[in-house]
Amino acid sequence: MALSTFVPQLWSARLLAHLDKNLILGNLVNHDYEGEIANYGDTVKINQISDISVKDYVKGTDLEYEDTDGTPTELKIDQQKYFAFKVEDIDTAQANIPLVDRAMDRASYKLRDSVDQHVAAHSAQAGIQLAATALTTPESAYSAMVALAVAFDTENVPDAGRWVVVPPWVYGLILKDSRFIASGVQSAADTLQSGRIGGAANFTVYKSNNLVYDITAKTYSVMAGTNAAITLARQIIKTEPLRLQNSFSDAVRGLLVYGSKVIQPNALACLKVTEE
């Protein structure tokens, strides 16, 4: 890699594209305010819409107009992660596949884990909290999906776009249940990129190792929701090359800033599950 040919904007776009492909939880939320951030520490004001009443109409009477402004909330860009790696000249010359390109791919995977773990932590702010339950059979795993669906129905959460994220061992259970709809032959590649594994109880099911795990209680926080529940904004604000002074090496470093917020708590559910 020659430093003179390194275009930061192109590499930042490529890194962000890899990150988008690899995200699981980060792709199940909305990114409505992403274009409004530029640096770590930025704050975005989110104006909520209040409920609109429906009134009886009486001919000849004046209509009453309601204010749509709800209680505003703030999205803070309070997370920042960096990567930095070097490639020695001799390695660059001998590699069949450019090492820098491969290293950037690996950086995107690590950034994915950081972002997904951050989003997974919002399970604590879910408006729907279901009691801990042990999942030991395919039937119990599927019943847990049904319980989540009923909880969403009770809160009038729209059917469209519902998702649930489970740890791999729960996926192993529901896979044995005939009511689970697998994604088909194409699913192998899709699962590697998106974590999507099929459908159950009107949810699109995803698997992830980044869900919150309570070591003391030995519980995993299964998350369910819709795109409206959480907003996430992230920006790669620096991707730059440099020549190291103390070795025959080129280096690349980058900085990602991000933040997320639960904006519709009743469209987010948390079910704590145990293996025994």
Image (spheres, rainbow, N blue to C red):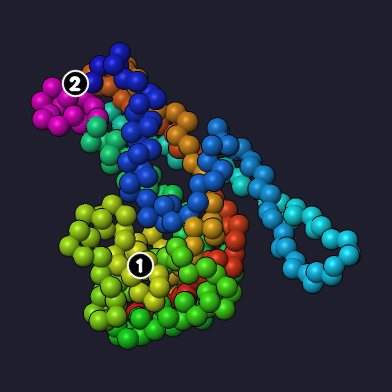
Residue at 31% from the left image edge and 61% from the top image edge: 196
Q: Is residue 91 magenta?
A: yes
The three-letter amino acid code for the residue at tag 2 is Asp
Q: Is residue 71 left or right of residue 36?
A: right
Residue density around tag 1, few if under 14, some if 14–19, many if 20 or more, within 10 Å:
many
Q: Is residue 130 above or below residue 230?
A: below
Q: Could you tell which of marks 2 and 1 lies nearer the N-terminus? A: 2
Residue at 58% from the left image edge and 37% from the top image edge: 36
Q: Residue furthest top?
A: 4
In the rendering, which numbered label is found on residue 205?
1
| Image coordinates for residue 188, horizontal then vertical, percent | 20, 59
Q: Is residue 263 above or below residue 136?
A: above
Q: Is residue 96 magenta?
A: yes
Of 61 and 29, the residue lying toward us: 61
Residue at 30% from the left image edge and 67% from the top image edge: 198
Q: CA distance from mark 2 to mark 1?
A: 45 Å
| Image coordinates for residue 114, horizontal then vertical, percent | 42, 49
Q: Give the labeled residue for mark 2.
A: 89
Quadrant of the rendering where the C terminus is positioned: bottom left
Q: Mark 2 vs mark 1: give the one in front.
A: 1
| Image coordinates for residue 102, horizontal then vertical, percent | 23, 36
Residue range (magenta): 87-100
